[in-house]
Amino acid sequence: MPRIIDLEGVMIHESAYVDGPVSIGKGTKIWHFSHISANCEIGESCVFGQNVFVAGNVKTGSRVKVQNNVSIYTGCELEDEVFLGPSCVLTNVTNPRSQVNRQSLYEKTLFKRGATIGANATIVCGITIGRYAFVGAGSVVTKDVPDYALMVGNPARQKGWMSRHGHLLGEPDDEGVMVCPESGYRYKLENSIVKCLDLDEESSLPEDLSYGKKTYRDFKI
């Protein structure tokens, strides 16, 4: 399998290994000791940190960020702007046994646009993580996660709703509206479904709201 060491518009660290054939979008960075397997489709402006493994036939969208020590196995699909925190664990077989070959039975796990997986969290395969959902550090997720849901614990349970800026949304007003303390964007809870009222779900944040100016704790004070 040929090793790719140079792709136009892509930064591949000299210690990283990229198998061909592969499709990687411009602006993507692949850092130390990472391994991108053949037949992957990776979008533009992604970042793969140190010691990341991406298995064959994995697909990611653009502007995806994968922190150190993460393995993305066949069967996983990441939409645009997904964040995988350091050392989080993804899987692709619910009932693995060394003595039983299930390579033709890999289960699909879908990470929808803008979802965040915290450090050391575990995602059991065969589920969907909703748009802009937020899985807290160390959580173990075994079931589908709704859009914007905050999930914590083992097994993970929903503890509220998170804004696109990663803030816990307060109690809804009489009209079911919640406001993000950082962006001012309004979110509406209706029939157990949250949607942003001020920005299309498939749109990226405008540039002036794409850079944080205060820490999470600053907003809690």
Image (cartoon, grey):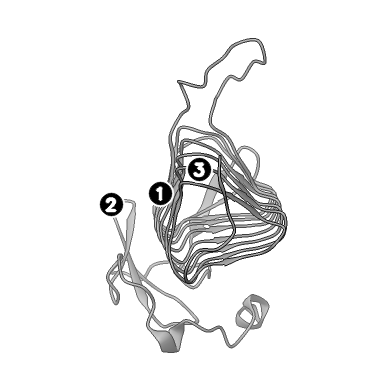
Give the number of the mark in front: 2 or 3: 3
Can you identify the residue that label 3 sits on?
A: 38
Relative side of 32 to 140, left or right: right
Quadrant in the picture for residue 79: bottom left
SS for callout 2: loop
Question: What amino acid is labelled 2 in the image?
Answer: Asn
Across and down, in percent, residue 83 comes to 54, 60
Q: Is residue 147 above or below residue 81?
A: above
| Residue 15 found in image quarter | bottom right
Residue 85 image offset from top left, x and y in percent: 63, 57
As drawn, 77 above or below 29: above
Q: Which residue is mark 1?
A: 146
Please name which of the two marks, 2 or 1, marks the residue nearer to the observer: 1
Is 119 in front, or is 133? 119
Nearest the viewer among 195 and 127 is 127
Please name which of the two marks, 1 or 3, marks the residue nearer to the observer: 3
Q: CA distance from mark 2 to mark 3?
A: 43 Å
- Tell me the kind of residue under disc 3: Ala
Query: In the rendered view of the protein, which quadrant contains the C terminus?
Result: bottom right
Q: Residue at x 43, y 34 (%)?
A: 108
* Residue 118 horizontal side relative to residue 78, left or right: right
Q: Quadrant of the N terminus?
A: top right
Near-viewer residue (77 or 116): 77
> Which numbered disc covers residue 191?
2
Nearer-N-terminus badge (1/3): 3
**What residue do we see at 37% from left, 83% from top?**
206
| Cα distance in 3D space between marks 1 and 3 | 32 Å
